[in-house]
Image: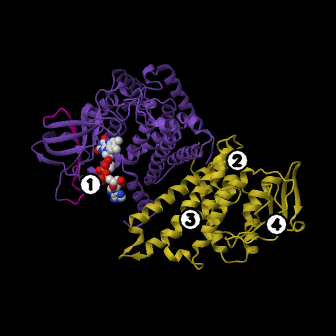
Amino acid sequence: MKLADDPEVEAFRAEFAAFLDAHLPDEAGARERAGSSAHVPRWARRWQRTLFDAGWLLPGQPPEYGGRDATLPQQLAHLEELARRRVYHSFNPQGLGIIAASLLTFGTEEQKRRWAVPILRAEITAALGMSEPEAGSDLASLRTRAVPDRDGFVVNGQKVWTSGAHDADVLLAFVRTDPDAPKHQGISALLVPTGAEGVVRRPFGSIAAEDDLDFNEVFLTDVRVPRENLLGPLNEGWRVANGSLGHERTLLWLSYAERLEDLLRDAADAGAGQEWYATLRMDLTALRLLGHRQLGQDRDPAEISVLKLLGSEAVQSASLYALEAHGVEGLEHPARTGPYHHMHHEHFISSWFERYARSFAGTIAGGTSEIQRNIIAERILGLPR
Amino acid sequence: MEFELDEEQRLLRRTVRETVAKMRGRPEDQQWDTYLRLGWLEAPPLELALILEELGYAADPTPFLATATWFAPLTGRLPEGSGTAVFDGAGRYVLDADRADEVALLTGRGVIVVPGAELAAPRVPVLDPHLHAAHVDADGLVAAVPEPALLGLAATCVGACRRVLDLVLDHVRQRAQFGRPLGSFQAVKHKAADMHVAIERARALTHFGALTLAENDPRRTDAAHMAKAAAGECQRLVFRHGLQLFGAMGFTWENELQYHLKRAQACDLLLGVASVHRKALLA
Ligand SMILES: Cc1cc2nc3c(=O)[nH]c(=O)nc-3n(C[C@H](O)[C@H](O)[C@H](O)COP(=O)(O)OP(=O)(O)OC[C@H]3O[C@@H](n4cnc5c(N)ncnc54)[C@H](O)[C@@H]3O)c2cc1C
């Protein structure tokens, strides 16, 4: 254990910082950012492409996938550097961080070329179709069916909460391919082009605003999907899903740290003299430390749940404290922050009330806090199921 | 930064846990002599934090904590025998002041060391049956608490909390009600998970504090306050859930749980509870 930073990691950080200084477009500076939307303004596509070409998009990947074989601590330094400047490197975070990452883990060479690379190059965007009306926390109870047919599948069913699906070119959908198998064993992962016949997307508003249209219902009626769109082996989608969720949660803790950092900065004036400000600093420091620890060898992946729970709940309490400290001013809702409103330009000046309401995204999405507690109790502490 | 214990540190932790478990129930002198012989008092900050966590885990009855993290950092040397220190001007509830061979007093003109025998400081009864505390007549003393003392209490507190959680986990795995082990009920699991997260948070901040101390990093004062505050918050949660989950059994003297609950609570109360240190972070 040591405080000192590894010189190789620091050299890597400095190289990336210099790259950002030279190439970061003005639009990507402080206040321009998206929520979780797949809606991609043109400059953002260019910016993501620049990052990809320079090997700075997913630096942990090999060069042919836009990376530079960076070590885990280097990858963390890369994300920290982006966070420090409040820069989003992708306007399609699910596509980049979950779907492309899953494709690179589980995909065939052909699938990586056909789907992962275009997602990384911001030529197409992707959305994640896990949840269904009857399958939220209990994801394995999903019912969307894919029936084998000649050289592919016919898909029927419905997805919901599909972030950014309205703008996405492809959906990574989890579907039931063997209705007779035990719950976890009959699931497969399919890439469903959203332009295919039988795909209907209906965006709907979030708690933040009626026209904050990032959530979607996706209806799939007799959609034909070719066999080569199957990701991973048939009926082994559960493994892909767990891999995808792993990617999602790994990214999430850092985004909570980033958000806490923002809260700390933005709430500083209200925070002076307030005890919660200290709690915020402790949570942030602990989160960072535990996140660094998670980079160590042989860490139990279940420990990501500690980070997710700690981080998302800390962000939530922090925004509530800040809201209360600002008092009645917090009622105001000056900024329309949906993807159709100024591409989230105003995200950072949205009201404290909105920030508090939005903090529930963290405690619900990617596995609720209750589910994280179950994981901690069962997998880390060994309590019976 | 690297925030993973290295092989040697993990080995130390294992050795300390085994040694302390073996010494359990032996006379206090023997335990104390063993710790001295193993050189634990001279351990650098992070290693000391690991040792203290284990001693906290075992509700250690010896004057190790005060000697290693109160006396030694203040005087820059180890005492002949055991030692303690008076930091806060009021001189109340000074750990081990009734039995220390040497006592360090922090005055306006520096640190004075007096033989423990010269101080009339009879032991004050406290709820933790193994904890020694005494009031020291401390006129003219400066109220200032050095970081090592705060970190020592934080590390001990983390160890005690971890012990409570381990006892709770064993209990809820074995005890059945409604035809199922208690640990299979979600209300119980969620309390256990929250205790785990609170302990991990406090432990991370304690280790961070020890690292900053070892490297004389400018963040060390803040880090020590954070560690002490987080340990206190953790203690509060662990005490409440821990005792609750044992049911009436936790309310008895016979149950070992009490020692660890009390040790953890004592660590929070000594040298300022969590809210005091949270406030210190605002300065
Ligand atoms: C902002 C946001 C973005 C999202 N984006 C996507 C996306 O892109 N793609 C996608 O597929 N999904 C997405 N989701 C959906 C998300 O994954 C689900 O909302 C989540 O898994 C919870 O499912 P649910 O909403 O159906 O709640 P439920 O599962 O119905 O849970 C409701 C409540 O019951 C509790 N509960 C449920 N089961 C248990 C249990 N076993 N023990 C204790 N408590 C339990 C929950 O913790 C929660 O408090 C998103 C959600 C949000 C909020």
Is residue A194 within the magenta segment?
yes
**Residue A8 visible in the picture:** no
Closer to us: A254 or A214: A214
Q: Is the C-beta separation of discs 4 and 1 under 8 Å?
A: no
Residue A199 is situated, as x and y percent measured from the top left of the image, at 16, 37
Q: Are marks 1 and 3 on the same chain?
A: no
State which quarter of the image contains the C terminus of chain A.
Answer: bottom left
x%, y% of residue B129? Answer: 68, 73
Cβ–Cβ under 8 Å for marks 2 and 3: no
- Give percent across and percent down for residue B95: 75, 64
Residue A221's place in the image compared with B97, above or below, is above
- What residue appears at the point 36 percent right and 46 percent down from the top-left corner? A365
Give me the chain that's yellow. Answer: B
Name the residue carrying label 2: B213
Q: Quadrant of residue A98?
A: top left
Q: Are marks 4 and 2 in contact (CB under 8 Å)?
A: no
Between marks 4 and 2, how big is the CA–CA gap?
25 Å
- In the rendered view, would you say A39 is above or below A359? above
Write down the region rendered in magenta.
Answer: A181-197
Q: How many C-alpha atoms fall within 10 Å of the one at disc 2: few (<14), some, or many (≥20)?
A: many
**Whole-Å distance between the Cαs marked 2 and 3?**
29 Å
Q: What element does badge 3 sit on?
A: helix
Which of the two marks, 1 or 3, is nearer to us in this view? 3
The residue labelled by disc 3 is B239
> Which mark is in front, 4 or 2?
4
Chain ID for purple: A
Secondary structure of the residue carrying numbered label 2: helix
> Which disc number belongs to residue B100?
4
**Nearest to N terminus: mark 2 or mark 3:** 2
